[in-house]
Image (cartoon, rainbow, N blue to C red):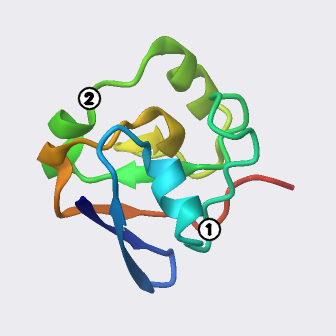
Amino acid sequence: MVAITFIEDNGTRHQVDAEPGTNLMEAATLNMVPGVLGMCGGICSCATCHCYVGDDWRAQAGAPAEGELQMLDAVTHRRPGSRLGCQVIVSEAMDGITITLPPDQDAG
């Protein structure tokens, strides 16, 4: 299992364990982390799993694909390190990662 800490915009921390091969959105929604909706179920079509990967973890998270970058163009709170959690596959190298969540998921 891989330990992941999700931090809500208000500072509340949620530590979860995830199986390698799942994605960050699944890790959050399966553990009922507030602030991650995952409305499209992980097909990179809604951006309701927007999260921030810190500088020190970006290499382990991999680079976003073009489709993900296009979806991120539509989010309100985009910043360096913005990713769609459904597109970040959990690996053993990510054990201990901290993921920060935006104030909202633009789900209207």
Q: Position of residue 32 (x, y in %)?
A: 59, 72
Dot 2 falls on a residue whose secondary structure is: loop
74 relative position to 91: left or right: right
Vertical comparison of 44 with 107: above or below: above
On residue 62, the disc is: 2
What is the spatial separation of the Cα atoms under label 1 and label 2, in whole angstroms? 23 Å
Q: Position of residue 29 (x, y in %)?
A: 59, 61
Dot 1 falls on a residue whose secondary structure is: loop
Q: Position of residue 39 (x, y in %)?
A: 75, 47
On residue 43, the disc is: none
Residue on which disc 1 sits: 35
Residue at the top extreme? 66
Q: Residues within 10 Å of mark 1 (few under 14, many from 20)?
A: many
Q: Residue at x 61, y 74 (%)?
A: 34
Q: Residue at x 69, y 40 (%)?
A: 41
Quadrant where the N terminus sits is bottom left
Nearest the camera: 98 or 29? 29
Answer with the quarter of the image where residue 104 lies. bottom right
Vertical comparison of 24 with 45: above or below: below
Nearest the camera: 97 or 51? 97
Q: Residue at x 59, y 21 (%)?
A: 70
Q: Is residue 63 visible to the viewer in this orientation of the structure?
A: yes
Q: Residue at x 51, y 23 (%)?
A: 69
Amino acid type, callout 1: Gly
79 relative position to 104: left or right: left
Q: Residues within 10 Å of mark 2 (few under 14, many from 20)?
A: few
